[in-house]
């Protein structure tokens, strides 16, 4: 399952975000921006604190219920893929996302680099890609509700504390940031 | 006093061409050293059948559009400019096509001409035939060539605020140049006509001039 795809420009601004699983609790638009900015910062820090010189920075962040994969292009654009821990061939999917991006965003004359992505064809082809790698969950399947509950806690360790309302507990930023630094 | 001034001006002017001559001779030496021939000196048949990367073309076309967009007022103006750019391509493409085809004959009838564009021209320019060639049922002088998946707008998503724009205007320009070059003057425009499964389908509308229809009448 693929939950979301984010694209962060080289300055740390969020230029694209899309959620693919219905039933997940949504972040507010401001929270999306903060998430992108924070991840950008964490990525920079992790590449600096690595004992091996020339390290690339954080590539994957793992919790019990989801993984965030990060792929940085040579130009500094970052692709974030929030997926199920069991989702296979992430590398291939990431490459394909990059390919779709370079086809329908970079070659689109109406798309300014580093600006929020508004490209109809990009949306269409990305959805097609997510479907083709089996990353899509529709609201009709039972799995999505289970996913909703799990991801709603932010990480699996707080399972016990969860009450009824999933919307009250979205995957919050402090959790993600601290997990990233500790990893 | 005045005569010496004019003489000095003359000498300056006389020295100018020699400067130009000198620089051109150095550039030819550079060419010789690198052992490259200019594209104009290569044999035209050498590149026959070779293909250009779609991506390279997409980047070029994207830059053409961005360049043009900065220098126009309004969408109509942009389409006209794209049409002009296509015209410049079309007129050269026709020359090359006719020169390369040893058995080519001159088309005199409208249908033969349109069929030539539909098959031969489309095949050389886009590597496939156009998807349909139709005659308008409403107007006697209108014909339509449709491409289900035009290469020029393959990677382009037109934003909502300029939704009337069709980048196929470039293709329309090519067609217009070829029609003109074969003595079938006409007005050619591009329209987006999406159908199921082909959201980018573009129809090239060819409106023939009156004189062409009159000539066609005589040839019957």
Image (tube, rainbow, N blue to C red):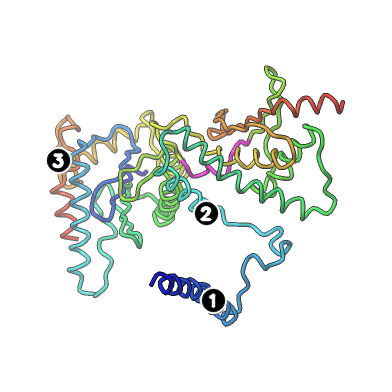
Badge 2 and badge 1 in a common chain: yes
Which dot marks residue B55?
2
State the image coordinates of residue B104 (x, y, percent, origin top left).
Answer: 82, 48
Left or right placement of residue B205 versus residue B65 in this view: right
Q: Is residue A171 magenta?
A: no
Badge 3 and badge 2 in a common chain: no
Can residue B162 be spotted in the picture?
Answer: yes
Range covered by the magenta-colored residues: B147-156
Q: Is residue B149 magenta?
A: yes
Quadrant location, the N terminus of chain B: bottom left
**Badge nearest the viewer, 2 or 1:** 1
* Residue to which mark 3 is pinned: A160
Quadrant location, the C terminus of chain B: top right
Quarter of the image holding residue B122? top right
State the image coordinates of residue B196 (x, y, percent, origin top left).
Answer: 57, 28
Q: Is residue B21 above or below residue B126?
A: below
Kindly indicate whether the residue at mark 1 contacts the one at mark 2 (C-beta within 8 angstroms). no
* Residue to which mark 1 is pinned: B27
């Amino acid at each position: 399952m693929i939950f979301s795809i984010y694209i962060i420009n080289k300055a740390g601004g969020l230029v694209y975000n899309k959620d693919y699983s219905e039933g997940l609790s949504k972040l507010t638009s401001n929270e999306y921006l903060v998430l992108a900015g924070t991840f950008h910062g964490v990525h920079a820090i992790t590449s600096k604190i690595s004992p091996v010189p020339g390290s690339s920075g954080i590539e994957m962040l793992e919790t019990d219920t989801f993984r965030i994969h990060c792929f940085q292009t040579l130009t500094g654009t970052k692709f974030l893929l929030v997926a199920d821990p069991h989702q296979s061939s992430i590398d291939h999917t990431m490459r394909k996302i990059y390919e779709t991006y370079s086809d329908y965003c970079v070659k689109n004359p109406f798309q300014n680099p580093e600006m929020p992505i508004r490209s109809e064809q990009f949306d269409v082809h990305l959805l097609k890609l997510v479907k083709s790698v089996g990353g899509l969950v529709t609201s009709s399947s039972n799995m999505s509700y289970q996913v909703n509950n799990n991801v709603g806690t932010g990480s699996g360790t707080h399972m016990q504390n969860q009450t009824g309302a999933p919307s009250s507990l979205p995957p919050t930023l402090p959790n993600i940031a601290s997990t990233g630094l500790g990893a | 006093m005045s005569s010496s001034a004019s003489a000095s001006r003359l000498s300056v002017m006389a020295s100018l061409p020699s400067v130009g001559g000198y620089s051109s001779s150095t550039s030819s030496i550079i060419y010789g050293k690198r052992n490259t021939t200019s594209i104009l000196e290569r044999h035209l048949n050498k590149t026959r059948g070779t293909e250009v990367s779609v991506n390279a073309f997409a980047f070029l076309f994207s830059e053409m559009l961005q360049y043009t967009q900065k220098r126009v007022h309004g969408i109509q103006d942009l389409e006209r400019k794209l049409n002009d750019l296509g015209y410049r391509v079309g007129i050269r493409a026709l020359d090359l096509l006719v020169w390369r085809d040893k058995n080519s004959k001159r088309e005199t009838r409208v249908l033969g001409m349109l069929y030539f564009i539909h098959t031969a021209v489309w095949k050389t320019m886009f590597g496939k035939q156009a998807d349909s060639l139709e005659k308008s049922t409403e107007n006697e002088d209108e014909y339509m060539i449709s491409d289900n998946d035009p290469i020029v707008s393959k990677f382009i998503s037109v934003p909502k605020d300029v939704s009337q724009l069709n980048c196929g205007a470039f293709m329309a320009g090519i067609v217009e140049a070829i029609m003109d070059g074969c003595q079938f003057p006409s007005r050619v425009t591009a329209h987006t006509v999406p159908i199921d499964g082909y959201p980018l389908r573009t129809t090239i509308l060819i409106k023939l001039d009156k004189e062409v229809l009159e000539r066609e009448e005589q040839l019957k």
